[in-house]
Image (cartoon, helix red, strand yellow):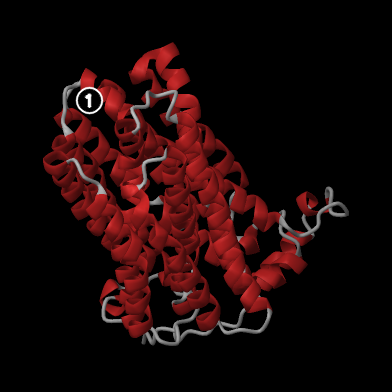
Amino acid sequence: MTPQTSAASVSDSPQMKIGATSRRGNFRWIICSLLFLATVIAYMDRGVIGYLEKFLETVIGWNSIQYGYITAAFQAAYGIGLLCAGRLTDYLGTRRGFAVAISVWSIAAMLPGAAYSALTFGIAMFILGLGEAANFPACIKTVAEWFPRKERALATGIFNSGANVGNIVVPMVVPFLTLTLGWRGAFVGTGALGLLWLAFWLVLYAKPHEHPRVSPHELALIQADAPAHTVPEHTTNVPWLKLLPQRQTWAFALGKFLTDAIWWFYIFWLPRYLQGTFHLNLRQSQKPVIVVYALSIVGSVGGGWISSALLRRGNSANVARKTALLICALAVVPVVYAPHAHALWLVVGLVGLAAAAHQGWSANLFTLPSDMFPKAAVASVVGIGGMMGALGSFLLQIATGHIVGRTGSYAPLFLLAGFAYLFALAVIHLLAPKLAPASIS
């Protein structure tokens, strides 16, 4: 049965007839909202330790170097998990793959509540990294399945903004949970949210051509793009050996390697930097952290909007994506001044601008696999790129622990953060000058 025939028969079902007059053919945005919420929960789960780090430093007794190894353990597992998660998501399908992943990471997010040393925290964060690795491959694959090319950057920007919302929610709820349930309860409380999300996912998700809430008009919009690849879109398995030699794979993967580490530096070290530099306690650091990530939301959605707007005006995907990437890369540069500024809110503004630009960059970078690869390979390519991003983050986490622990200075780290994106864009353009579809036989 063809997708069109399937959609037609589904549209005649009783479920479709109920409320058909009120449906406007926008169910894909409900799916996008689920991806957004999953990303919020993922970043809440991983953000708790970053926000409580200075507090846990006195309770558990670790130092900067040990904390660097704890966060590096998360990154190592995240990289391993991304490599496998993309493949597993392509194999199991989005619905089952996502369900398995969020079950694992929700339980793992509660495990730090039972930790009692730097080693046991490291083990708990390693397991959390394995589970959370599936979030972005599954989200990107879902966007490729549910959105036409002209809407993918915007949809990606919307769900990717969940990272910022998650980071905003952490300073809002963690002090309350810590005061009422203790710091162990803070980990358990945030981890349990994923199991609630899972129930909604299982009820609401199906492929577009099988979904009773997708009208023929919306299905036609979703399937509007003619396949621009040499592999048919119904292909269920594209071997890694056919993906790894592709220049397009490495354009995405090296872009991730060079820039993901900066974002993870902010997540795991920004609260510590602000609390230590400006002598803030948990409550005093709430507003600065919230402002940084509130600005990031604007960047995430705005970055996706830029390339989508350029596409609507008739520009090629190559021009639209790279123009947006360039704007974001230039907006990051002022952050190099942050460690030399002595006013809290000036630092917050510089880091907030850089974080917003990173999210705009990320929204466009994540669309590249769906621009250059068939849908059946998208999650695998995202997994390969995510693994490379995690490798870069793993190295930077260890380096940050040693730099801060031995020198007390964050200046080299902000210098790296300021120029990494321009270098990454040059690498992407060198490897994929036209964002041409990968030639996979």
| Residue 315, image quadrant | bottom right
Secondary structure type for disc 1 = helix
- Quadrant the N terminus occupies: bottom right
Viewed as shown, does residue 138 lie left or right of 418?
right
- Quadrant the C terminus occupies: bottom left
Q: How many numbered marks, from 0 up?
A: 1
Toward the left, the furthest residue is 406
| Residue 248, image quadrant | bottom left
Viewed as shown, does residue 30 lie left or right of 173?
right
Q: Which residue is drawn at 32% across and 65% down?
A: 420
411 vs 62: above or below: below
x and y percentages locating residue 326 in the rendered image: 46, 73
Viewed as shown, does residue 218 lie left or right of 371?
right
Q: Residue at x 32, y 58 (%)?
A: 417
x and y percentages locating residue 388 in the rendered image: 27, 63
What residue would you read off at disc 1? 57
Q: Which of 194 and 98 is in front in this view?
A: 194
Q: Can residue 110 be seen in this view?
A: yes
Amino acid type of the residue that numbered disc 1 sits on in the rendered structure? Glu
Q: Which of 5 and 271 is in front in this view?
A: 271
Few, some or many C-alpha atoms within 10 Å of disc 1 (few <14, some 14-19, many ≥20)?
some
Q: Which residue is drawn at 26% across and 24% down?
A: 56
Q: Which of 140 and 219 is in front in this view?
A: 140
Q: Which residue is drawn at 40% across and 22% down?
A: 186
x and y percentages locating residue 62 in the rendered image: 16, 28
